[in-house]
Amino acid sequence: MSAPWHDKKELIKLAEQAETKIQPMIKQAEETADWNQAKVLNIFKEEGVSSFHFNPSTGYGYDDTGRETLDRIYAKVFGTEKAMVRHQFISGTHAITAALFGVLRPKERLVYAGMPYDTLQTAIGLSENKRGSMKDYGIACDIAPLDSEGYPDSKAILDRVYPETRVVALQRSKGYASRPSVSMEKMQKIINEIRAYRKDLIIFVDNCYGEFVEKTEPGHLGADLLAGSLIKNPGGGLVRTGGYIAGRKQYVDQAASRFAAPGIGLEGGATLNSLLEMYQGLFLAPHIVSQALKGAFYTAALLEEAGLETFPSCLETRTDLIQAVTFKNKQSMIRFCQAIQEASPVDSMVIPEPSPMPGYKDEVIMAAGAFIQGSSIELSADGPLRPPYTAYIQGGLTFSHVKYAVQQALHALMKEGLLPEQHSNEQ
């Protein structure tokens, strides 16, 4: 049975050109996956992972060997002293705020390198002072502007460090922004400069979307605390909910007290039936991330061939999975996302429309026909409806699915006259 785009000669030509162009990047992604797979496997062996580690606990969850072993594995994987991995975290934002609230106290200050994404702005109290935000607790946040290229600027960060400043926060991924993501090479330089200025500052890294894209993680570079979501990279497409915090022992302990309660911390928390998928998901993560990464290279290459603006470009080295694509107008962005939904294994019949979303100022369109609701390691395309009209494509459990879906989405734009050379009026 032939695929539905095979009668479109122009699309076939673009697809062939795109895949040929990115072969060096494909090879690079596979080499990184091999490295990270060996690392994870060796850590599993060191910790003596056995089938009894997958047994569930209930109630208070005390003395859960599987949970405690998984925490140690995460700490080793991310290059930190300690970690906590919990299915009770509902999102990356939840894990990040637990980490920050754990180490910050009223009248202390946080410096953020660049404006954080919308949901964190709400949690910190930058966009509105909701009850329970950091601002509501008397914790101030200073935003250090990015440099001319969009990267964290060490001088700008240090200029905003006061005696009461406790934490410097860095965001690895660009999120819903035109800024570039921060490679581990650049991250190392920034961490070193902050550490040389004041050794007592806690360096926090939002690690979402970046796990296993490179061979090192922020913990290996000296970051004090990092956090992420299990329905993104480290869950390997299997974990249904959860998040992690990793870092220096004292800071993870403080975050655990905030997450649970002082005196309970890491000692409680029933795992129910979550452990098997968390272990297996982590084991699969290097491979799944490489599939999504290859999909990101391909998405950029194909859409560039069609005249669309992409960021990063198809031949740029990556440190996260997010591929931004800018469209001429709102209609083109909406139609592209709808076509990605049509090529999804779940809810392909649903037509996504822009709508309000908690934590965001603008309406958001989300194409996410995923097995796990909101899973960013599965293929999705979304973004706030605001100029410039940029969709953020991320994830993909298989490279083949990403290729199919992006070809279908491009076909829809071609057929409906929504490519740049086919129209010029802003809508």
Image: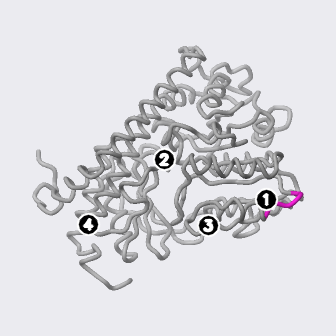
Q: Which residues are magenta?
A: 160-164
- The image quadrant that residue 120 belongs to is bottom right
Check disc 4 and report the residue beneath it.
306
Frontmost residue, 250 versus 332: 250
Query: In terms of secondary structure, where does tag 2 sit?
Result: loop
Residue type pointed to by label 3? Asp
Query: In terms of secondary structure, where does tag 1 sit?
Result: loop
Magenta run includes residue 161: yes
Q: Residue at x 48, y 76 (%)?
A: 387
Q: Residue at x 29, y 53 (%)?
A: 405
Query: In terms of secondary structure, where does tag 3 sit?
Result: loop
Check disc 2 and report the residue beneath it.
375
Q: CA distance from mark 3 to mark 2?
A: 32 Å
Frontmost residue, 422 versus 80: 80
Magenta run includes residue 141: no
Residue type pointed to by label 2? Ser
Earlier-in-chain disc, 1 versus 4: 1
Q: Is residue 299 left or right of residue 257?
A: left
Q: Which quarter shows the C terminus?
A: bottom left
Do tag 3 and tag 2 residues touch (Cβ < 8 Å)?
no
Residue type pointed to by label 1? Met
Relative to 253, residue 100 above or below: below
Check disc 1 and report the residue beneath it.
134
Earlier-in-chain disc, 3 versus 2: 3
Q: Position of residue 20 (x, y in %)?
A: 23, 50
Q: Is residue 315 left or right of residue 118?
A: left
Q: CA distance from mark 3 to mark 1?
A: 26 Å
Q: Which quarter shows the N terminus?
A: top left
Determine which of the numbered discs, if any, sits on residue 147 in the image.
3
Relative to 216, residue 180 above or below: below
